[in-house]
Amino acid sequence: MFLDELPEFRRHVIDALRQPLEDHAVTIARAQITLSYPARFTLVAAMNPCPCGYLSDSRRTCTCSPAQIRSYRARVSGPLLDRIDLHIEVPALAYDDLAERVPGASSSQIRQRVIAARQRQLDRFAGEVFCNAQMITRHLRQHGQLDRDGQALLAKAMDRLGLSARAYDRILKVARTIADLAGADQIRSPHLAEAIQYRSLDRQLRDDARFAT
Ligand SMILES: [Zn+2]
């Protein structure tokens, strides 16, 4: 499911996604009966950095006040962000950057890496679950172990970003996947550091909250 302009959705609509994102089920309760339907889906959402959209653009000037920017971001609730694994800032590209094709891995090369990483996960869980995203606490304890450096790094990030227990688990799962993509048996600090980087909106909201108090 793709939600464009995430902050434009009404708060109760966005918050209604929390349960299905967490439980992979939609529960409908009526006077006579309560029904649950399976709802495993991938949520992709996009938002601008500010109401006018030019906050991080080097060629245009943002016309929003700091208060407008804070209230725009605050429309997306922390509990929903907690349930989104990857936050990525995509800066505007100049035409020259777009036109200049940077050589990188081809789609077919990336596909091979993804297939290999998924296979590692299938082998690891032996049919219990299918991928890292489905890991429960017991799996995380077994397969999300960090070395001493990793533990120190994550403890620092939790403190610095004010992350919740839910975000902590999600970072571990993402780090496990990054390690799988690298063909590594153990999660190492670089895998963990990359996973922590994908929490940029937690960072922004934390900064906004500090400014407001
Ligand atoms: Zn703006």
Image (cartoon, rainbow, N blue to C red):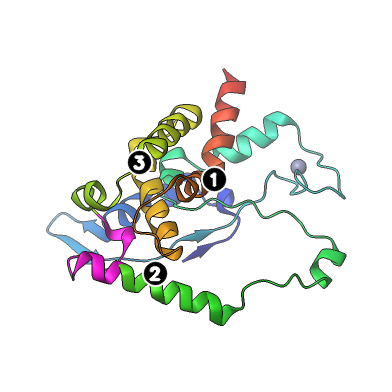
Q: Is residue 126 left or right of residue 188?
A: left
Give residue 2's position: percent from left, percent from top.
51, 65
- Mark 3 Cα shell of 10 Å, populated few (<14), some (14-19), many (≥20): few
Task: Assess whether residue 125 is covered by the magenta stretch.
Answer: yes
Q: Which of the marked residues, 3 or 2, is nearer the chain's N terminus?
A: 2
User: Residue 147 got which mark?
Assistant: 3
> In this picture, is 106 found above or below 63?
below
Q: Nearer the viewer, mark 1 or mark 2?
A: 2
Disc 2 residue type? Answer: Ala
How busy is the neighbourhood of tag 1: few (under 14 within 10 Å), some, or many (20 plus)? Answer: some
- Residue 62: x and y, percent? 81, 42
Does residue 16 lie above or below 200 as drawn? below
For the residue labelled by badge 3, is the local secondary structure a helix, a strand or a loop? loop
Front disc: 3 or 1 = 3
User: Which element type, helix, strand or loop, lies under badge 2?
Assistant: helix
- Amino acid type at circle 3 is Asp
Q: Residue at x 46, y 44 (%)?
A: 189
**Closer to us: mark 3 or mark 2?**
3
Q: Element at badge 1? A: helix
Magenta-span inclusion, residue 124: yes
- Magenta stretch: give its range: 121-135
Give the alpha-carbon distance from disc 1 to disc 2, as whole Å: 21 Å
